[in-house]
Image: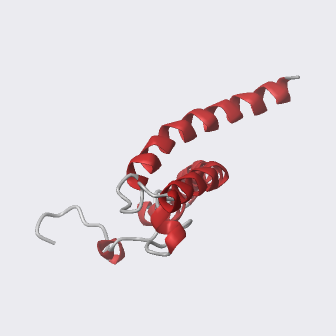
């Protein structure tokens, strides 16, 4: 019974987190030039339907990656760069499928891509 309650709690948290992401996808889809046509409406509907399972999977992956990054930090002796590499890969990326993704105009990135300055070592001294 307790396991079922934990599973239900996790499901509810994921549902609320996912519902917070859906309006962003709708706003992004509204920018599509063909949004007034039947094709645009179909693309928006398809992107919304695909976002439901994809977004839920991405949120789960990000949560597990966040915890794993924290454990990486602890077990690496406080190595922030190692933890950040796990966090960037798991937390960043595409959460919402938009019509631009379905048309091939934008890539879908399940795994996050590090920014250009992430390869530089972290320093605490100004000017370096």
Q: Is residue 125 left or right of residue 51?
A: left
| Point 42% across, 60% down: residue | 80
| Point 35% across, 56% down: residue | 31
Image quarter in which the C terminus is found: bottom left
x, y percentage for residue 15? 62, 36
Seen from the viewer's position, the closer of residues 88 and 37 is 37
| Point 57% across, 33% down: residue | 16
Q: Is residue 93 visible to us here?
A: no
Q: Is residue 123 above or below residue 95?
A: below
Q: Is residue 10 above or below residue 87?
A: above
x, y percentage for residue 62? 57, 53
Q: Is residue 12 left or right of residue 115?
A: right
List the single residue furthest toward the right: 1
x, y percentage for residue 121? 32, 73
Seen from the viewer's position, the closer of residues 91 and 67 is 91
Image quarter in which the N terminus is found: top right
The image quarter containing residue 43 is: bottom right
| Point 54% across, 68% down: residue | 102
Q: Is residue 107 visible to us here?
A: yes
The image quarter containing residue 50 is: bottom right
Number of marks = 0
């Amino acid at each position: 019974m307790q396991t079922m309650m934990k599973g239900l709690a996790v499901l509810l948290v994921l549902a609320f987190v996912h519902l917070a992401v859906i309006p962003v996808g709708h706003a992004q889809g509204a920018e599509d030039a063909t949004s007034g046509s039947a094709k645009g409406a179909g693309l928006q509907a398809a992107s919304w339907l695909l976002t439901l399972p994809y977004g839920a999977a991405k949120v789960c992956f990000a949560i597990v990656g966040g915890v794993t990054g924290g454990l990486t930090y602890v077990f690496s002796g406080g190595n922030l760069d190692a933890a950040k590499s796990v966090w960037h890969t798991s937390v960043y990326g595409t959460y919402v499928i938009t019509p631009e993704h379905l048309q091939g105009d934008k890539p879908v990135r399940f795994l996050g891509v590090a920014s250009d300055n992430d390869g530089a070592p972290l320093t605490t001294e100004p000017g370096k």
